């Protein structure tokens, strides 16, 4: 049981069409009667195509909407297929996920991620900055070294900023059903918090209604970034409820 202020961030990845927004009704209904309503911040990060209609649907709620990535350029330009942070802001996004491992795996470098974060902050977006080690790095026991360099380079020349949330997402845990051992996770979150003082640190990677009872005992976590389970309103609600039970 917690009574801490917690973030629940839904990452819909490349899932969802207009009809998918109907699933939000269940979540809105649940929030109306949820007694810990004031202790939580919900943020939905749908594909870019749904940002505008989603912000309209959530207008009367205190749920925020975010994007899943942005271009590094703050200015407009000839970058076919890309969207920058200003454009995301203009359709109602308040947050943007940057540095997700699914994007790091297709070539995003720490330098590029650093530029994206700077551009997002300049445009007035808050950033959900993802870091995490691969299975190979974990096996080599270099998790801390990897996280250290992702934080150092990703946040280079960015002052301690209340507009950044750090999401620790071990790559081997995303979409696999696996989560780190509780003591290990506590220690890693602690390591990040010592290195990045005053930052909120979230955990992401296969969070679901079954493992939330174990995760919620890890007292230094400030919330969760939830992929698969966030697309099912029942599972998403269950995760929130159980966190406070
Ligand atoms: C994610 O995409 O950030 C994520 C944590 O996914 P999942 O919950 O499906 O592992």
Image (spheres, rainbow, N blue to C red):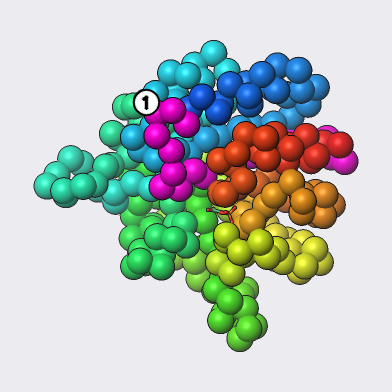
Residue 29: x %, y % from top left:
66, 19
Residue 126: x %, y % from top left:
47, 39
148 in magenta? no
Give residue 156's quadrant in the image: bottom left
Residue at (57, 59) in percent of width and height: 175
Q: Which residue is mark 1?
A: 52
Secondary structure of residue under mark 1: helix
Q: For this rendering, which residue is in front, 224 or 16?
A: 16
Give residue 50's quadrant in the image: top left
Residues rendered magenta in the picture: 1-20
7 in magenta? yes
Residue 200: x %, y % from top left:
64, 47
Q: Most extreme residue toward the top, as rendered?
A: 60
- What quarter of the picture does the C terminus occupy? top right
Residue 223 higher or lower than 106, as above or below: above
In-image side of 55 versus 8 (left or right):
left
Q: Most extreme residue toward the front, as rendered?
A: 19
In-image side of 41 versus 127 (left or right):
right
Residue at (43, 18) in percent of width and height: 56
Give residue 176's quadrant in the image: bottom right
Q: For this rendering, which residue is in front, 208 or 170?
A: 208
Residue at (51, 24) in percent of width and height: 22
Residue 184: x %, y % from top left:
76, 69
Residue 160 higher or lower than 107, as above or below: above
Q: Please say whether residue 152 is visible from this viewpoint.
A: no
């Amino acid at each position: 049981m917690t009574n801490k202020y917690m973030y629940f961030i839904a990452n819909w990845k490349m899932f969802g069409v207009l009809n998918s927004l109907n699933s939000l009704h269940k979540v809105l209904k649940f929030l109306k009667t949820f007694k810990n309503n004031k202790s939580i911040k919900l943020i939905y990060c749908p594909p870019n195509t749904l940002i505008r209609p989603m912000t309209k649907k959530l207008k009367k709620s205190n749920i925020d909407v975010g994007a899943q990535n942005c271009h590094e350029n703050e200015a407009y330009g000839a970058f076919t297929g890309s969207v920058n942070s200003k454009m995301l802001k203009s359709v109602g996004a308040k947050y943007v996920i940057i540095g997700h491992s699914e994007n790091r795996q297709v070539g995003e470098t720490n330098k590029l991620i650093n530029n994206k974060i700077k551009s997002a902050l300049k445009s007035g977006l808050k950033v959900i900055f993802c870091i995490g080690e691969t299975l190979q790095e974990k096996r080599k026991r270099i998790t801390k070294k990897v996280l250290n360099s992702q934080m150092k380079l990703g946040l280079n020349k960015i002052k301690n900023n209340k507009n950044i949330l750090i999401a620790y997402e071990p790559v081997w845990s995303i979409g696999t059903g696996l989560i780190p051992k509780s003591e290990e996770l506590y220690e890693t979150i602690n390591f990040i918090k010592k290195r990045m003082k005053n930052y909120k640190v979230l955990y992401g990677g296969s969070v679901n209604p079954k493992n939330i009872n174990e995760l919620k005992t890890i007292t230094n976590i400030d919330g969760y970034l939830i992929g698969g389970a966030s697309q099912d309103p029942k599972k998403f609600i269950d995760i929130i409820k159980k966190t406070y039970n």
